[in-house]
Image (cartoon, rainbow, N blue to C red):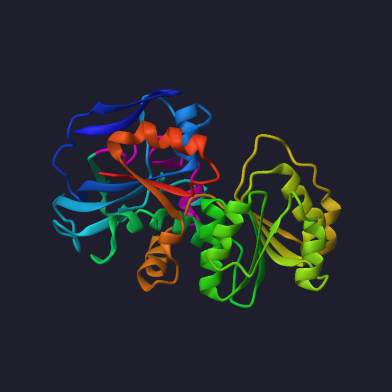
Amino acid sequence: MKAVEVARPGVLAIAERPMPPDPGPDEILIKVKAVGICGSDMHVYRGRSAFATYPRVIGHEISGEVASVGKGVLGLSAGDKVVVDPVISCGSCYACRLGRPNVCRDVKCLGVHVDGGAQEYIIATRDKVYKVSQSLSFEAASTVEPYSIAAQALSRGRAVGDDMALVCGAGPIGLVILQGLKALGAKVAVADVVDSRLKMAVSCGADAVVNSSTQDLERFAVDFTGSEGFPLIFEATGSIQVLELVVSKLASQAGRVVVLGYPPEKAQISPLDIMRRELDILGSRLNNKQFPTAIKWVERGDVDPSKIISHAFPFQDAQKAISFIEENPHEVCKAILKF
């Protein structure tokens, strides 16, 4: 079978890989149909991932159909349309025992730590495979994983319908968080430095947008929130300066700040800013069993994958797709490889 393989940083090829074996007990053989290209795939390709080893088959935003099932598998049969949760955990460390396997001591993600879904067939265990509606396109189904990231971030931030929220960053993750917040009924502002991204945010339901390269974000926050600051902020830009501003100036008293971006620099944050307003600063990583929530959002139309899918390529054109993403970052939101 064919697989999209990064042999070493900067070198990508359509490689021949052996077919997976017949599925064992509690395993499912899946014929892959669509795989989203994520920022982590780009990091693996460019050698900027702290976790990837090579050669590596990329891809963790996976949809496909069941080819066959192993002994003991219940609730799935050949032909079912499915998505795959890419998080792999040990099940025994403190985080796993606490019910937070997404931050397992030895957590792994398909396409980064181990081979991913950008290949014609994959094997997955039953607990990682979720059936979706046959009416969903494979491209839309592949966005369930990004929406699970949004569901996790909303869960970490304890988001509710009457929240007033700021999403920093209108890339794919910022936009799925925005859509998740609007599905709850929250009032949401989005900040970015790229006007085309902000236009996408408007199309996804943002109540207000602000280009922080040309407008004063602090002044905007005062006007939008009536001088109280934002009770809920999602930092998805990966900019140290934005994180510092969020904590020092933009969060309200008793505010919640959910951090998803991870630049290499260290932030200069005053503990006094955290203490005097009793801020909650919360990390959000991968997803913790959020696929059912994300599937419900997509199937009910609470969120709209068509708003974030901007391009699709045959998987044989994976190199062309990655080059296009790198050369046109302001045009591309979510690109899909089709199998």
Magenta-highlighted residues: 96-119
Relative placement, left or right, of 216 versus 306 is right
Q: Eyeballing the image, is 321 above or below 276?
A: above
Relative placement, left or right, of 28 versus 338 is left
Q: Eyeballing the image, is 179 above or below 321?
A: below
Location of residue 273 (image quadrant): bottom right
Q: Nearer the viewer, residue 92 or 136?
A: 136
Location of residue 230 (image quadrant): bottom right
Q: Quarter holding the C terminus?
A: top left
In the rendered image, residue 332, in percent from the top left (x then y), is placed at 48, 46
Label total for image: 0
Q: Quarter holding the N terminus?
A: top left
Which residue sits at x=73%, y=52%? Answer: 212
In the rendered image, residue 142, in percent from the top left (x then y), is placed at 35, 53
Relative placement, left or right, of 269 versus 127 is right
Q: Is residue 111 magenta?
A: yes
In the rendered image, residue 124, in percent from the top left (x then y), is placed at 27, 47
Q: Nearer the viewer, residue 258 or 140?
A: 140
Which residue sits at x=51%, y=59%? Answer: 176
- Magenta-colored segment: predominant secondary structure: loop
Q: Is residue 114 visible?
A: no
Q: Eyeballing the image, is 85 above or below 325?
A: below
Q: Eyeballing the image, is 116 above or below 245?
A: above
Which residue sits at x=46%, y=31%? Answer: 44
Which residue sits at x=83%, y=70%? Answer: 227
Q: Is residue 264 visible?
A: yes
In the rendered image, residue 34, in percent from the top left (x then y), is placed at 30, 48
